[in-house]
């Protein structure tokens, strides 16, 4: 697949994802975070002829970008602007009962970081928004400017695992209103008294506020449960996470559901990380962690598999 077709994004761990999902000709798959369509396109190519992908993304800009990038595959995919935690309902509405594979790539797309203008990045002056769903009411501006100092500190500690969360929260409240991403990043940098390093000092704070705005951990928890009902017997679930909170949640979920006569068989005994070569080509892949499991229906597996017509 030519990466040149992508507007910004280089998909992460493509070969490992295809192998983990055991993509086969004629298979039916769900890409829950379609982004710019990189993984979707690879799955479509590997599932020819007659493969099908349902692509879901909460970000309307991602749906527009992926629709453009997947034009050549017209007829073999459907894109839906919706929340992946509702994948069961979305699949049913699009004529799918049980599917062969589900992919959750939980990372930020380059489109959001480089062209979204919603304050996801601390490298440019952008409004503090951070919403994936631009129709929802809560924004990063609301969190930063309206939440109590103790609540902000708890969010940065819980979702960013930032040990100096109280110092950051105090600096934020003392300098309200905080209007832009650069203003927030500078406040964090000054609060932590750090200027250099490989990782920007505001990284954890931005991650935490973004997770709070979009309810990401709750959505992931629900999505993992939804995947259990949607996968057919032997269907595969592949999850790419980018920080320890997500990875722990996925690992613990698969561990619980894999115990005894469980409903998942873990395929990846050890987490899969990108190669050194991939990280050199795509630096954003460095924190990616892939886990794969296979759905096992012990009793009464679904009869239908794939598309349901009529």
Image (cartoon, rainbow, N blue to C red):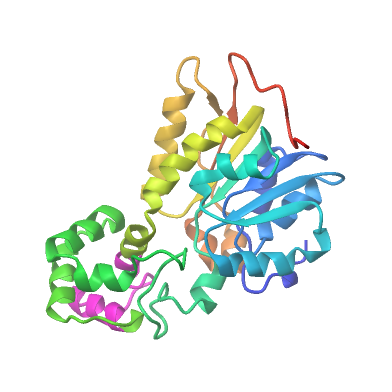
Image location of residue 82, percent across then percent down: 54, 55
Bounds of the magenta span? Answer: 183-206
Residue 168 location, quadrant: bottom left
The relative height of residue 267 versus residue 57 in the rendered view (above or below) is above
Image location of residue 32, percent across then percent down: 58, 50
Left or right relative to 114: residue 165: left
* Residue visible at 54% across and 50% down in the picture: 273
Does residue 269 show up? yes
* Residue visible at 56% across and 72% down in the picture: 111
* Front residue of 21 and 197: 21
* Residue visible at 36% across and 48% down in the picture: 245
Instruction: Identify the residue at the far bottom of this view.
Output: 125
Residue 268 location, quadrant: top right
Was residue 61 drawn as part of the magenta stretch in this picture? no
Left or right relative to 41: residue 170: left
Was residue 201 drawn as part of the magenta stretch in this picture? yes
């Amino acid at each position: 697949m030519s990466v040149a077709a992508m507007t910004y994004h280089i998909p992460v761990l493509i070969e490992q994802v295809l192998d983990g999902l055991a993509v086969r000709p004629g298979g039916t798959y769900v890409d829950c975070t379609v982004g710019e369509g990189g993984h979707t396109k690879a799955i479509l190519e590997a599932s020819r002829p007659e493969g099908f992908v349902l692509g879901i993304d909460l970000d309307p800009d991602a749906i527009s970008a992926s629709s453009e990038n997947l034009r050549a595959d017209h007829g073999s995919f459907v894109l839906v602007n919706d929340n992946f935690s509702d994948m069961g309902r979305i699949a049913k509405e699009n004529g799918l009962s049980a599917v062969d594979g589900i992919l959750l790539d939980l990372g930020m797309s380059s489109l959001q970081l480089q062209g979204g203008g919603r304050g996801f990045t601390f490298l440019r002056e952008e409004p503090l928004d951070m919403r994936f769903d631009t129709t929802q009411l809560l924004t990063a501006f609301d969190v930063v400017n309206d939440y109590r100092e103790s609540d902000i500190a708890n969010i940065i500690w819980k979702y960013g695992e930032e040990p100096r969360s109280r110092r950051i929260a105090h600096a934020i409240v003392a300098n309200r209103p905080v209007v832009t991403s650069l203003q927030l990043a500078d406040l964090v940098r000054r609060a932590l008294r750090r200027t250099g390093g490989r990782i920007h000092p505001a990284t954890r704070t931005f991650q935490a506020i973004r997770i709070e705005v979009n309810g990401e951990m709750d959505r992931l928890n629900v999505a993992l449960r939804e995947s259990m009902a949607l996968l057919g017997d032997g269907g595969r679930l592949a999850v790419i996470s980018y920080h320890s909170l997500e990875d722990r949640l996925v690992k613990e979920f698969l561990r619980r559901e894999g115990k005894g006569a469980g409903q998942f068989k873990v395929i990846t005994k050890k987490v899969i990380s990108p190669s050194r070569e991939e990280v050199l080509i795509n630096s954003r892949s460095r924190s990616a962690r892939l886990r794969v499991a296979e759905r096992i229906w012990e009793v009464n597996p679904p009869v239908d598999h794939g598309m349901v017509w009529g």
